[in-house]
Amino acid sequence: MGKPEDDLDDILGAHWNFHILGAAVRLGVADALAEGPRAAADLAAEIGASDVRAVSAFLNNAASMGLVRRVEADRFAETPMLALLRRDGGAYRNIVLMLTSPGLCRPAEMLHSVVLRGRSHTEDALGKGLWSYYEENPEDAASFADFMSELSDMVAGSVLSRYAFHEHRKVVDVGGSNGTFLSRILSEYPGITGVLLDLPHAVDRARRIMAERGLSSRVEFVGGSFFEKVPEGGDVYVLKSILSDWDDESCVRILSRCREAAPPGTPVIVIDWLYREDSAPIFDAIHLRQLARVDGKVRTLSEYESIFEAAGLAVGRVDSPTAGDAVAEWAPATVFETTRR
Ligand SMILES: C[S@@+](CC[C@H](N)C(=O)[O-])C[C@H]1O[C@@H](n2cnc3c(N)ncnc32)[C@H](O)[C@@H]1O
C-alpha cells in the first residue's frame, strides 16, 4: 500500500486517462500510428486537427500513460496497448467507445444520488432513457451493440453446451440486438429458424448484419417493443442479458408478454447474471452500473423467482457455468429454464 495521498492521486489521474483512451479511439490515433511513427504535426494533418499544439499535448499525455511511445521530440509510435484500440480488430475498441460515450458517462456523474435514491439518474442526465438515447445516437448504439455481440460470442459456447437448443425448431430471441447469439444457435443447428425482436432501429442494424452472415433467410425480423407484444409461434423464447436492464415491475411486464406468446409448456430461457452469497466483488460493481444506467440489477435467485412467479412462469433448472467452462467468471451466463405454469 502506498501513501493514501498517492493512492488518491492515482485514482484521480486514472479519470483523465479514461478520457484519453476515448479520444485516442475517436481521433483514429491507433489506426494512424499502426502505419509507423508520426510527428505530431503529420498526425494533426492526417486526423484533420487544426491545433498542432493540442495534438502534441494529447500525444504527450498518452505517452505518460504508456498508450503511445515518444521516439523523439514530438514524434510518437504505437505501443501494444494502442494496438488493442485499432479499427481493424482491436479487442478493446468497442468497450472503450461504449464506456466513454455520453450515454454511459453522464448518468455516472450523479452516482451519489443513484446510491441515495436507489434509482437511475439517466433520465435527468440525458433527458431520456438509455434506449431512447441509443435510438437518437446511432454510432453510440452501434458500439454498444458490437460490445454486446462480443459478450454473446464469449458466452455462447458455454450456454449452448448447457442448454439443448437442438430440441427446438423456432427460437424467438427477445431483445436480440445484432443477432449474434441467435447466429450462434442457427450456425450450430441448421434445422432451426429464428425470430429476432428488438426496437426498430436495432432491428435495422441486425438485418444488415445477419445478411452479411448469410443467415437472413432463416430469420424473421420484428421491430417493436417487448412491453407491447412478443411474437407468437416460437417453441423456445430467449431473454439474454435483458432482465438485468430493468426494475422488477418492468421485468414482470416483459416476462408476461413472453408467457402470453408462448403456448403452455414452451420454455422461456433467461440467460443473465446471478448474484450469490459468494459472488466476486465485480458482481457488486456490475449491479451498481446496471442501477445507475438503466434501473437494472444483478438479481439473487429468490429475486428471480419472485419476478418469474409474478409473470406466471415456473423456474426449473438453474445452471451456472462451472470452473471448467471457458467463460469469464463475471460473464452473464447463468441459464434459467422457466415454463408457463
Ligand atoms: C443489454 S442488450 C442485450 C442484447 C442481446 N440480447 C445480447 O445479449 O447481446 C438489451 C437489448 O434490449 C433492447 N431493448 C431495449 N428496450 C427494448 C424494448 N422496449 N423492446 C425490445 N427490445 C428492447 C435493446 O435495443 C438491446 O438490444
Image: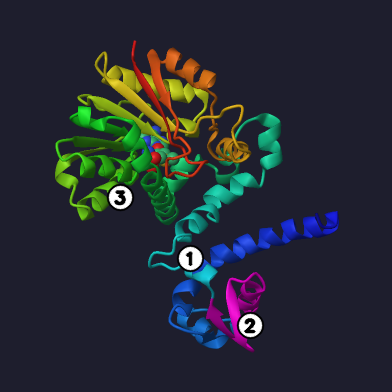
Q: Is residue 215 above or below residue 275?
A: below
Residue to which mark 2 is pinned: 53
Query: What residue appears at the point 45 percent right and 57 percent down from the top-left corner?
Result: 94
Residue 49 location in percent, x, y?
Answer: 52, 79
Q: Give the amino acid type for the residue marked by disc 2 in the picture.
A: Arg
The residues bearing labels 3 and 1 have C-alpha atoms spaced at a distance of: 25 Å
Q: Residues within 10 Å of mark 1 (few under 14, many from 20)?
A: some
Q: Quadrant of ligand 1?
A: top left
Residue 312 location in percent, x, y?
Answer: 38, 12
Q: Quadrant of the N terminus?
A: bottom right
Q: Please say if the residues under marks 1 and 2 sit with CB atoms less than 8 Å apart.
A: no
For ligand 1, tell me if the residue under mark 3 lies within 8 Å.
Answer: no
Q: Residue 333's quadrant in the figure?
A: top left
Q: Is residue 116 above or below residue 81?
A: above
Label whose residue precedes the other's in the sequence (1 or 2): 2
Residue 101 appears in the rendering: yes
The stretch in magenta equals: 54-78
Q: Which mark is residue 84?
A: 1
Q: Which mark is residue 76?
A: none
Query: What residue appears at the point 46 percent right and 82 percent down from the top-left corner?
Result: 46
Q: Give the amino acid type for the residue marked by disc 3 in the picture.
A: Arg
Label whose residue precedes the other's in the sequence (3 or 2): 2
Label whose residue precedes the other's in the sequence (3 or 1): 1
Query: What residue appears at the point 55 percent right and 33 percent down from the top-left corner?
Result: 295
